[in-house]
């Protein structure tokens, strides 16, 4: 399979439409995230003061010091998805033209954002941001091109063709991606010896942090359980002997490795309690695959999965489970609570919530795969909105927690994304039967 054929396959009119919608949504998110909380001042003197305050020299702050390296990296990372989505949403087969055009779009978007920040009272316009945003766009395009070329070449190999045609192998890869992203996001990696060293010392002194023992352990358990389960089903489908043992050992190794690498993620901290949860989830996931559960009715599966998701989301949202009188108010503006931060760390909680509900959306769409209309997506969105809204409401009584529309949007987005992924998986591995006479 050459690159052209690969491009034609993934770029159907339906996929192109979806990619463009995602590209537009991410562009709107960039504008929203860089202007929140929208403290605008259209006074001409304010605009002049902001314009005279920003440094016209790249990588030099207004006070003459060098630009902060973390800020530079964050601005690059912010626009990598823009370039990546822009490339896969492009129909052009000419790589150079695509690179130039999408990079220009990224530079124009960044310039618009920086210009709009001149009208705000709490944002700073910077030529460094414009340059780094353009670099991030370019990197995103290059990554998209590289991955497409690599995937096309690997897909041409016969053994890879056999694997990609196996629905259970594809499902295992999806589960692995879910576990990996959940373990390492928000990807604020560091090799700083001081940070890594202090985390190692803290891990040695406090290997088990009991006050936080019940927090995201339920979420971790479900993700790793699903990985071990589908991996066992895949190994069983290719007639591997001792498939549950192999799946348990393989998934435990992967899970523990990902847990250990959190030592290099600034906002993550590995622990023995998480390691124990991973091993336990792998055991039960592999064990469950041994039993024939196909006889269970769909509503039983749906009930169990919905209950498990609600409980794990509740553990995550309501920890440390100390309740008192109602306090605080509901935040209706997404991401307002963390707008001071400009990196993907701001998105950490949103992504966590998204990943919690993503498997549920996938599972519900799989159970009701015969429903081809939009009604199933509405059903999933409404159910998840109700559950997440209840959890947000309960946070009024938890000190240190606050009810936020961001979490509800994250839950709906996660479930919808899971349903879309399931829809893609079904279309790939369970194509509709041809009509009579065709």
Image (cartoon, helix red, strand yellow):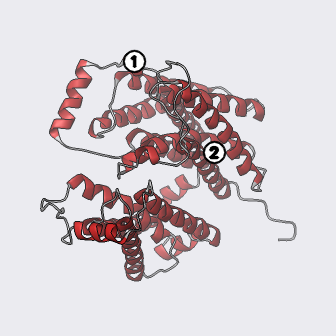
Residue 241 in sight: no
Whether 3 is drawn above or below 302: the answer is below
Total residue callouts: 2
Question: Residue 184 placed where, x, y %?
Answer: 38, 42
282 or 332, nearer to the observer: 332
Q: Determine the secondary structure under disc 2.
A: helix
Give the numbered dot on residue 362.
2
Question: Residue 97 placed where, x, y %?
Answer: 40, 83
Residue 403 found in image quarter: top right
Question: Residue 365 placed where, x, y %?
Answer: 69, 46
Residue furthest toward the right?
Answer: 436
- Which of discs 2 and 1 lies nearer the camera? The answer is 1
Q: Residue at x 52, y 72 (%)?
A: 7
Q: Determine the secondary structure under disc 1.
A: helix
Q: Disc 2, disc 1: CB below 8 Å?
A: no
Whether 329 is drawn above or below 177: the answer is above
Residue 1 as seen in the image, left or right of residue 111: right
Question: Residue 118 placed where, x, y %?
Answer: 35, 67
Residue 373 in sight: yes
How far apart in space, not on screen, are marks 2 and 1 (Cα)? 32 Å
12 or 70, nearer to the observer: 70
Q: To which residue does mark 1 refer?
A: 211
Residue 391 as seen in the image, left or right of residue 294: left
Q: Residue at x 37, y 59 (%)?
A: 78
Q: Residue at x 38, y 68 (%)?
A: 43
């Amino acid at each position: 399979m050459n690159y052209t054929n690969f491009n034609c396959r993934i770029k159907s009119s339906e996929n192109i439409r979806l990619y463009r919608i995602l590209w537009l949504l991410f562009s709107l998110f960039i504008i929203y995230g860089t202007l929140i909380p929208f403290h605008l001042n259209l006074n001409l003197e304010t605009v002049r003061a902001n314009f005279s305050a920003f440094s016209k020299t790249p990588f030099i702050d207004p006070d003459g010091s060098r630009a902060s390296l973390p800020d530079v990296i964050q601005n690059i990372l912010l626009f990598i998805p823009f370039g990546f989505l822009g490339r896969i949403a492009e129909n052009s087969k000419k790589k150079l033209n695509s690179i130039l055009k999408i990079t220009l779009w990224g530079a124009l978007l960044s310039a618009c954002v920086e210009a709009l920040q001149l009208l705000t009272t709490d944002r700073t316009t910077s030529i460094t941001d414009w340059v780094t945003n353009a670099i991030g766009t370019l990197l995103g395009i290059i990554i998209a091109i590289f991955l497409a070329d690599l995937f096309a070449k690997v897909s041409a190999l016969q053994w890879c063709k056999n694997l990609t045609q196996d629905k259970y192998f594809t499902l295992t890869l999806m589960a692995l991606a879910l576990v990996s992203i959940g373990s390492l996001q928000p990807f604020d990696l560091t090799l700083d010896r001081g940070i890594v060293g202090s985390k190692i010392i803290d891990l040695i002194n406090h290997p088990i942090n009991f006050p936080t023992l019940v927090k995201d352990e339920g979420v971790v358990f479900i993700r790793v359980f699903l990985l071990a389960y589908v991996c066992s089903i895949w190994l069983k489908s290719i007639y591997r002997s001792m498939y549950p043992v192999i799946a348990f050992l393989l998934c435990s190794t992967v899970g523990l490795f990902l847990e250990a690498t959190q030592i290099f993620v600034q906002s993550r901290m590995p622990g023995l309690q998480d390691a124990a949860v991973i091993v336990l989830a792998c055991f039960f996931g592999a064990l469950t695959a041994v039993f024939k559960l196909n006889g269970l009715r769909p509503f039983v599966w749906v009930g169990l999965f919905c209950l498990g998701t609600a409980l794990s989301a509740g553990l995550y949202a309501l920890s440390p489970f100390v309740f008192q009188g109602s306090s605080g108010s509901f935040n209706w503006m997404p991401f307002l609570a963390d707008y001071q931060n400009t990196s993907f760390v701001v998105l950490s909680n949103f992504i966590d919530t998204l990943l919690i509900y993503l498997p549920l959306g996938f599972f519900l769409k799989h159970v009701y795969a015969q429903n081809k209309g939009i009604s199933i997506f509405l059903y999933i969105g409404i159910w998840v909105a109700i559950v997440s809204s209840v959890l947000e409401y309960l946070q009024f009584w938890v000190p240190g927690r606050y009810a936020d529309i961001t979490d509800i949007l994250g839950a709906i987005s996660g479930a919808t994304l899971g349903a879309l992924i399931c829809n893609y998986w079904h279309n790939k591995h369970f194509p509709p039967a041809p009509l009579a006479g065709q």
